[in-house]
Image (cartoon, grey):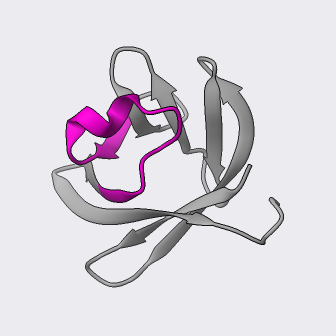
């Protein structure tokens, strides 16, 4: 399973997520520098969740949330009154850390 990364459109900041087993029967990815995961939740679809399981981002359009793997393309984040647009992309050729 390959890593994924979120690239913030505003400034190109990159957040890398590495494979971290499965969750709810689908791949799970953990961010390298924080306790954040990209996971599939039955009631929400694909999203990024914090250590408490609270979602704070998801793919656009929302209908792409129910694919087998996190969809590439635009994702919207929201937290503490701020929102950013990211692009999810898959990363080949680098072993997970």
Question: Residue shown at 38%/28% (left/top)?
Answer: 66
Closer to the camera, 4 or 36? 4
Image quadrant where one finds the C terminus: bottom right
Q: Position of residue 3 (x, y in %)?
A: 67, 58
Q: Position of residue 95 (x, y in %)?
A: 83, 64
Q: Is residue 10 above or below residue 64?
A: below
Question: Residue shown at 45%/22% (left/top)?
Answer: 41
Residue 47 is drawn in which quadrant?
top left
Is residue 34 found inside the magenta-colored segment of the image? no
Is residue 58 found inside the magenta-colored segment of the image? yes
Question: Residue shown at 33%/45% (left/top)?
Answer: 57
**How many numbered marks, from 0 up?**
0
Closer to the camera, 49 or 87? 87
Residue 22 is drawn in which quadrant?
top right
Q: Is residue 38 above or below residue 90?
A: above
- Which residues, given as a range, are shown in magenta? 55-74
Q: Is residue 92 above or below residue 57?
A: below
19 sits to left or right of 85: right
Closer to the camera, 7 or 52? 7
Q: Position of residue 43 (x, y in %)?
A: 34, 15
């Amino acid at each position: 399973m390959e890593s994924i990364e979120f690239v913030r459109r505003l400034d190109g900041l990159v957040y890398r997520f590495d494979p971290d087993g499965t969750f709810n029967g689908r791949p799970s990815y953990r961010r390298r520098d924080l306790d954040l995961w990209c996971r599939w939740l039955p009631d929400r679809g694909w999203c990024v969740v914090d250590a408490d399981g609270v979602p704070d981002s998801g793919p656009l359009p929302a209908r792409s949330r129910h694919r087998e793997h996190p969809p590439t393309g635009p994702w919207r984040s929201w937290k503490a009154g701020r929102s950013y647009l990211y692009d999810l992309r898959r990363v080949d050729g680098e072993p997970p850390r």
